[in-house]
Amino acid sequence: MIICVFVLLLFTCSVASQQHIDTEPPVITSWKVYENHVHLEFSKPISDFFEPFDRFFDIDERLIIADVRTDEPSTITLLLSDEIQCGFRYRLTVSKLEDAHGNTMLDATVFISTPCRAAPHDIVINEIMADPSPSVRLPEYEYVELYNRSDKNIEIGGWTFSYGANNNRVLPEYLFPAGGYLLLAHSTAASDLTAYGTTLTVLHAVAAITNSGQYMQLIDNEGKVISWVDFNSDWYADPLKSNGGWSLEKINPDLICSVESNWRASTSRNGGTPGQQNSVHATVSNIHASEIIRIAVPDNNTIVLYASNPLGNILPEASQFAITSKVEQVEIAGNNFDQLKLSLQTPLREGEWYYLSITGDVDDCVGYTMPPSSFYFSLPQDIDNFDVIINEIMFNPSIDGYSFVELYNRSQKAVRVSDLRLALRNNNGELPTTLIPLTDEPFLLLPEQYLVVSRNAEIVMQQYMATNRSAFLQVRNMPTLTRTSGRLVLLNVSQHIIDEVHYDSRQHADFLNLGNGVSLERINPDRNSLDPSNWHTAAQTVGFATPGSKNSQYMDFEIPSNTEVSVFPEVFSPDNDGFDDLLSINYRFDTPSLIADVIIFDSSGRIVRTIARQQLLATEGTFIWDGADDRGRKALTGIYIVFFQTYNSQGLQKVFKIPCVLAGNRR
């Protein structure tokens, strides 16, 4: 019995000893690259090994191993003679290494690489198929094309593609080769679009991109914006193509400006060029030189300057901005990278005006250096009645034109444009229940400044040869002006009416036989907005509109101090050349509540035009004669008499007879 137990114990110990013998070879569990170091992690400690190292490590011929370190038992570090070039994959084979038990590892090959750090605009959004229906020749799917315009292979795994309000999609791992194209689409589109190039399934829905346009961003792992675009359907510049089936293509991908003039509808017979060079590709794109056009003061310690183009990558120095309160810090801000945010050393004070000048070079995204600029400004103030007025209206644009409304700050205040709303009354005289701001940006409209709002400010500027870019604002939610008449209202943030105008096509001079594309101009900013005689057709000599500049029909009514009734000019020529087109009949009385008749007679004593009948007067004011008779026809040239009669209930009566001359074209 004792012998049997002893034999059993020997057998058990022998089996246990055999179970603890390690026969598993080591394997590589992970690797990391830091500059010129390759760190290899193994599943178990590695025995010492000696030179030559190439017996154990066979590396890509583009790399040379300078030394090998074993700081930790299961870690080996290869020191390379040069840094690993980012964006490339290198082959490394490890063999013949043994662990402490003499187990030799099987040959293992890994491909080592380090991702390139992308700078802004290394990869650009290059083509957008927002509305694929009806298809021209391409598969009927939305896509966004990215183009790697750098000389680096860039790993974009973990990046975010953001589009619309809340659509943020994380990109899968993908090494984006230099000079390559990549399509982002919905999963259902992948099989068809792959024929045109590498496709990643990123878009969350088949119809994910808004046809009318939206903001898009490509953001890297560190939250840095690499590319962006804020497109809209006007960028097609072709009504047929904007209706579907055609993509928007970037003209010059090497110009980092993602602005309208660098995009165009595809000219490819397929409707787009996914995965290849754009059909509209050109070396040069017609992008205007940039300038600082607006200023905002969001709080007492901050100034924001707005540029007409996105800014370049070089941050200006704080010393380039001269102001009483020293500028401490400068940042590039805004979704479109077109803002300079200035942080001040001491806060701005209420009621005080400041002078800011930009003295140094500020470059835009094309490389243009912006001209020096300056602003005389203050902290914004609340907008009261008649501070800002409606000054010009284009409600019947030409076929290829756009309507616009020009505002004018006649006050001595700096006001926020984001506090303004424009609306049209309906047939019942009611305003919309929801009023949308002209802009979300709090930039200032300074005293005596104009602001022209339109759905396509660029086209308005081109059509009327306007050069003052600071006076134009593109407003997508602008009310649609009716082409014959309407009641346009300007309100403040509290929805208090600031100004109101009843415009009508009959306010145009009938005898001029004008077509579309002619604006109504306010004659004098200080006169009543609802007085039809305070509006007149813009002069032909200025192209029938003056958006962003002084009205061609502006008149400054100065009534002589010793005269109760006067006319100006004594000789006028209603030929719509912007020079003495109107006759102003000015009055000033000391007696209140007078009633007036104002009638134009010709030299033979015949009534030509009745200007006013039994009209209750203010103590001073102006009537306008545009040279038309009571039937809307242009009166003949010659001498006329302005008959101005006043009276009241107490029997007071005065009669004035003042001659004037209606002349022909005086130029």
Image (spheres, helix red, strand yellow):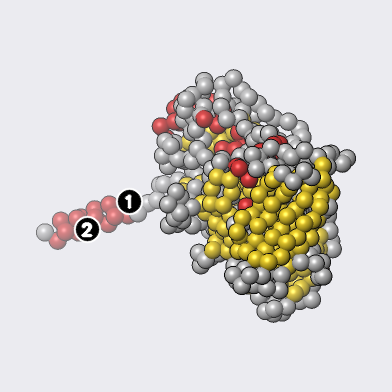
Q: Nearer the viewer, residue 162 or 583?
A: 583
User: On screen, 649 above or below 397?
Assistant: below
Say the numbered circle drawn on residue 18.
Answer: 1
Q: In the current view of this chain or complex, which residue is farthest to the left? A: 1
Q: In the current view of this chain or complex, which residue is farthest to the right? A: 667
Location of mark 2 (residue):
9
Give the residue drawn at x 27%, y 52%.
15
User: From this viewpoint, is residue 252 visible?
Assistant: yes
Where residue 618 appears, as percent x and y from the top left, is 65, 67
SS class, disc 1 = helix
Where residue 327 appears, as percent x and y from the top left, is 75, 72
Query: Which quadrant of the view contains residue 121?
Result: top right
Circle nearer the N terminus (2, 1) = 2
Say the numbered circle drawn on residue 292.
Answer: none
Q: Are marks 2 and 1 in contact (CB under 8 Å)?
A: no
Give the residue drawn at x 49%, y 47%.
164
Q: Label 1 amino acid?
A: Gln
Within 10 angstroms of label 2, few (less than 14), some, or many (20 or more) residues? few
Q: Nearer the viewer, residue 445 or 260?
A: 445
SS class, disc 2 = helix
